[in-house]
Image (cartoon, rainbow, N blue to C red):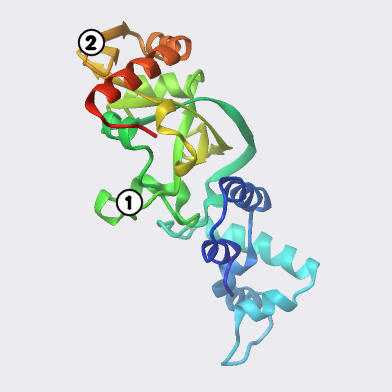
Amino acid sequence: MIGWYQRAKKRVISYDREMAFLRNYLKQGFDPYDYGWLVEEFLENEGFGVDDDFDGNEWVEKATPQQLEEFKEWAEDKLQNVQEDTTTPAYRHFDYERIQTPGWLVHFTDDAFGVAWKGFLYGHEEVEGLGLTTWKGESSRKKYASFNFALDADSKYATWAANSHKYGKDAVVFWGSGVLAYHHGDEEGQVIFWGPSVKTDMIFPIYFREGEWVVEGEDGRVMVQGEFDTAVNWIQNNYRMLQQIRQRDNRRRGQPRS
């Protein structure tokens, strides 16, 4: 059976649709169709025999709500001892919290300049494994825009990630929204957003240099430096000036920016 996300990918869909799909997927949680391969073992454990041509997904389709609930309880217990990988459904790692209203977010990266200039070109297309994206090497990640991760720029999670350099040595601060979900393994609230939805003129790089976070103008001039919160707050209060500087410099170079 083709899941909702596979069906969705066959159509051109909007950012709002993408976020609605992700929200519903995480809120719904356990999907028995993801674990049709466990149904045979479940039934045998319950004392029922199955035919040689048994199809677990067909059983799921015909099962009663009570049978599905019993299967869910058994499967969730069983899955505690199953090795996770990059195909594990995202709802195994996230608890949906809410839709994050538009605001300032931060994405940590080792290519802050490239992201700020070109936007979020690459992301994670599949919701399967979305909770274990750090397990994927750069060469194995799909090279087109999709889901990306950020933290609320003013949150304790962002400050901690900045101090620990857990996700990258530099960062971009940007205006956006997405689905806020709590990641069990990382123990933090993460905003999952659709990369193409973020306008490049609202993405601003900050760099970690010699123990301080630095905001630069297009010409490389240091605008502010200090603690992570200092750099973030400065961008929030002065982003229009940064935009004007960027537009002026782009006009001089003859390079329009989206």
- What is the three-letter code of the residue carrying label 1? Lys
Foreground: disc 2 or disc 1: 2
Quadrant of res 108: top left
**Helix, strand or loop at mark 1:** loop
**Residue marked by disc 1:** 136
Crowd tier of the residue under label 1, counting other residues whose Cα lies within 10 Å: few below 14, some 14–19, many 20 or above: some
Q: Quadrant of the C terminus?
A: top left
Position in image of residue 160 (x %, y %): 41, 21
233, above or below 12, in the image: above
* Front-most of residues 198 and 63: 198
Residue at image coords 68%, 74% = 60
Badge 2 amino acid: Arg
Foreground residue, 202 or 44? 202
Outermost bottom residue: 52
Binning the other alpha carbons within 10 Å of mark 2 as few (below 14), some (14 to 19) or many (20 upward) gives few
Element on which disc 2 rests: loop
Instruction: Report x, y in % for residue 24.
Output: 66, 51
Instruction: Identify the residue under disc 2.
Output: 221
Residue 55 shown left or right of residue 217 in the figure: right
Q: Earlier in the sequence, mark 2 or mark 1?
A: 1
Residue 206 in the image: state x and y as whole percent.
32, 20
- Which residue is drawn at the image coordinates 62% and 41% (left, top)? 96
In this orientation, which residue lies closer to the viewer: 47 or 179? Answer: 179
